């Protein structure tokens, strides 16, 4: 059922009940809803309408309280049809720009600052994920000898990102041989996606003639290329803000809920997988039981994707379903656009 299928009175009372619960963390009582709604009707009439909304699955009645609490369905109707998103205040916008533009400005630093400042401004858990690199196109690569047994591989991605990898070598390789191997790799691999490089590397290098002193180095790429050009990490380059601010919320007052929260933040693979599925979907809001993973069933995840060239990543917040959606949506979208601008 959508907001349009509710009566005007039901919409107003449901919106007020949700806003009351979001602000107070206490079940919304009919007297308070009557006062806030400005409908000019008695608490008894409000109580009757709230009972109807409970029957339709939008509110539920805790045994220990006379008030009512919104369900996941209520929050969905609120987000989709009742709420008006508000842009960040000037103070919040200034804080976002100040934090995101602080030095240093490496890609990972920008994402870490984005997750942290969202945690502070929203009191939720800020989250950010780097783009997936399978479809990233290699612009060029550099090989830099840094020690007798290691060479630094610098991958320049067409979107402007740079990734570095240490490649172990069994013996020292002369600098001129390293440079010639780099030239061969650039000739054969530049302009190709990393996924295609991994699957076709042997064919692309099969007839390459290794320079004097560079045979072992070229053979390393032939033997280990699938791992070398796989930039995926177990946690998907996931960045989390401060969980302490989220833990201060009433929903996490019990030791069990705190334990569940800490367990979730440690299960970075779960969060990375969830964020990875949202990378090219723009603004996405998943509420409570809408999550396919039961570990997230009591939480809401609000994310906005950002683009770096042909790649997309995700920035957002994770928190209890009782969150100020109207404010948080604006903060998440603004942060995403600021990060996108900085990375461009």
Image: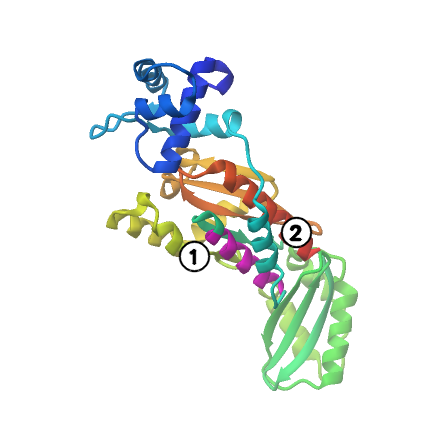
The residue depicted at 68 percent of the width and 52 percent of the height is 341
Q: Residues within 10 Å of mark 2 (few under 14, many from 20)?
A: some
Among all residues in the image, which is located at the extreme left? 64
Q: Are marks 2 and 1 in contact (CB under 8 Å)?
A: no
Q: Position of residue 37 (x, y in %)?
A: 42, 22
Left or right for 271, reference 188: left
Pick whichever, 20 or 334, lies toward us. 20
Q: Which residue, given by chain and number where applicable, does mark 2 sit on? A: 340
Q: Is most of the magenta stretch helix, strand or loop? A: helix
Pick whichever, 311 or 80, lies toward us. 80
Q: Position of residue 334 (x, y in %)?
A: 60, 46
Distance between the alpha carbons at the discs numbered 2 and 1: 22 Å
Magenta range: 106-120
Q: Is residue 231 visible?
A: no
Left or right for 290, reference 313: left
Q: Give the numbered dot on residue 183.
A: none
Q: Judge whether residue 190 is colored magenta.
A: no
């Amino acid at each position: 059922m959508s907001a349009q299928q509710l009566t005007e009175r039901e919409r107003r009372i449901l919106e007020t009940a949700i806003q009351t619960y979001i602000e107070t963390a206490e079940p919304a009582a009919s007297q308070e809803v009557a006062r806030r709604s400005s409908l000019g009707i008695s608490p008894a009439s409000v109580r009757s309408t709230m009972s109807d909304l409970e029957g339709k699955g939008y509110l539920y009645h805790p045994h220990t309280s006379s008030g009512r609490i919104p369900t996941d369905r209520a929050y969905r109707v609120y987000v989709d049809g009742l709420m008006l998103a508000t842009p960040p205040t000037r103070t919040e916008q200034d804080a976002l720009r100040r934090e995101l533009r602080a030095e240093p400005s490496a890609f990972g630093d920008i994402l870490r600052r984005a997750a942290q400042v969202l945690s502070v401004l929203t009191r939720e858990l800020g989250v950010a994920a780097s783009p997936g690199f399978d479809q990233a196109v290699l612009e060029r690569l550099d090989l830099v000898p840094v020690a007798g047994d290691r060479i630094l591989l610098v991958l320049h991605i067409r979107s402007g990102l740079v990734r570095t990898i240490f490649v172990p070598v069994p013996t020292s390789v002369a600098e001129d041989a390293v440079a010639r191997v780099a030239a061969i790799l650039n000739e054969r691999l530049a302009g190709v996606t990393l996924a295609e490089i991994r699957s076709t590397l042997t064919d692309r290098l099969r007839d390459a003639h290794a320079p004097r002193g560079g045979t072992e180095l070229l053979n390393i790429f032939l033997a280990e290329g699938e791992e070398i050009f796989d930039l995926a990490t177990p946690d998907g380059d996931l960045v989390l803000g401060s969980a302490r601010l989220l833990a201060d919320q009433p929903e996490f007052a019990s030791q069990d809920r705190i334990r569940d929260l800490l367990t979730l933040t440690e299960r970075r693979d779960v969060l990375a997988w969830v964020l990875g599925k949202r990378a090219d979907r723009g603004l996405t809001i998943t509420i409570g039981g809408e999550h396919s993973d039961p570990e997230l069933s009591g939480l809401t995840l609000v994310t906005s994707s950002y683009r770096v060239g042909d790649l997309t990543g995700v920035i957002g917040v994770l928190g209890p379903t009782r969150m100020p959606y109207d404010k948080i949506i604006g903060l998440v979208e603004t942060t995403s656009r600021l990060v996108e601008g900085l990375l461009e």
